[in-house]
Amino acid sequence: MGNVLQMLKVHETVKLNAAAASVWEAIGDFGKLAEWHPAAVTSTKEIRGEDTVRVVSIPGGGTLVEKLEVLDADAMSQSYTIVEGPLPVANYHSTLKIVPGDGDVCTVDWSGSFSAKGAEDVAAMKVITSIYTAGLSALKKRFGEAG
């Protein structure tokens, strides 16, 4: 069958006790990941040629470079890919979006697809899942979780 890389998927959500616009204000700026995500020590946005990238310093001294693929402020959605970094993934593509609910409630929906690189599938999925859940937990602490 050859060496076909299986595409893995991770999908996490959290329902917050906050208006979608308030949450988007906190997480919508692609360059400001470090302001809300505990796994980002610092994050800066740069323009490289035609691309918008963010350079994220992570605990332990590693650096991630992620490329913004789509930013849709009206839909409160951003999609990005990993250009380089220490994570055990290849062909990584992710979308972080906010789905408004009734009144001041919204759902933050974070999904990604990728292949494992230099690690077992389960280990790669665990790393990505832990990144998503850490970010969503921080948002829960900040905005409160909706029942």
Image: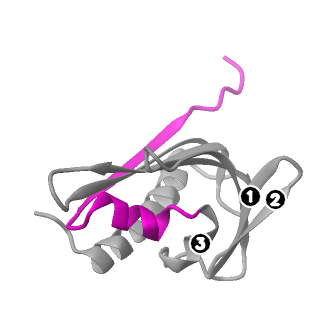
Q: Are marks 1 and 2 in contact (CB under 8 Å)?
A: yes
In this orientation, which residue lies closer to the viewer: 25 or 114?
25
Helix, strand, or loop for circle 1?
A: strand
Mark 3: few, some, or many residues within 10 Å (few <14, many ≥20)?
some
Amino acid beneath label 3 = Lys
Measured from the top left, where is residue 11 in percent x and y? 39, 47
Mark 1: few, some, or many residues within 10 Å (few <14, many ≥20)?
many
Seen as rendered, the residue at the extreme left is 147
Spatial separation of the CA atoms under disc 3 and disc 1:
12 Å
Residue lying at 74% horizontally and 58% vertically, measured from the top left: 53
Residue 53 disc label: 1
Going from the N terminus, do you reach mark 2 or mark 3 first? 3
Measured from the top left, where is residue 27 in percent x and y? 47, 66
Amino acid beneath label 1 = Val
Going from the N terminus, do you reach mark 1 or mark 2 first? 2
Vertical position of residue 115 compared to residue 22: above or below: above
Vertical position of residue 128 compared to residue 32: above or below: above
Residue lying at 26% horizontally and 63% vertically, measured from the top left: 19
Residue 139 magenta-highlighted: no
Residue 22 magenta-highlighted: yes
Vertical position of residue 146 compared to residue 69: above or below: below
Where on the picture, by quarter, is residue 59?
bottom right
Spatial separation of the CA atoms under disc 1 and disc 2:
6 Å
Horizontal arrangement in the rendering, residue 119 relative to residue 84 (left or right)? left
Q: Which residues are magenta?
A: 1-29
Q: Which residue was labeled with disc 2?
A: 47
Q: Which residue was labeled with disc 3?
A: 32
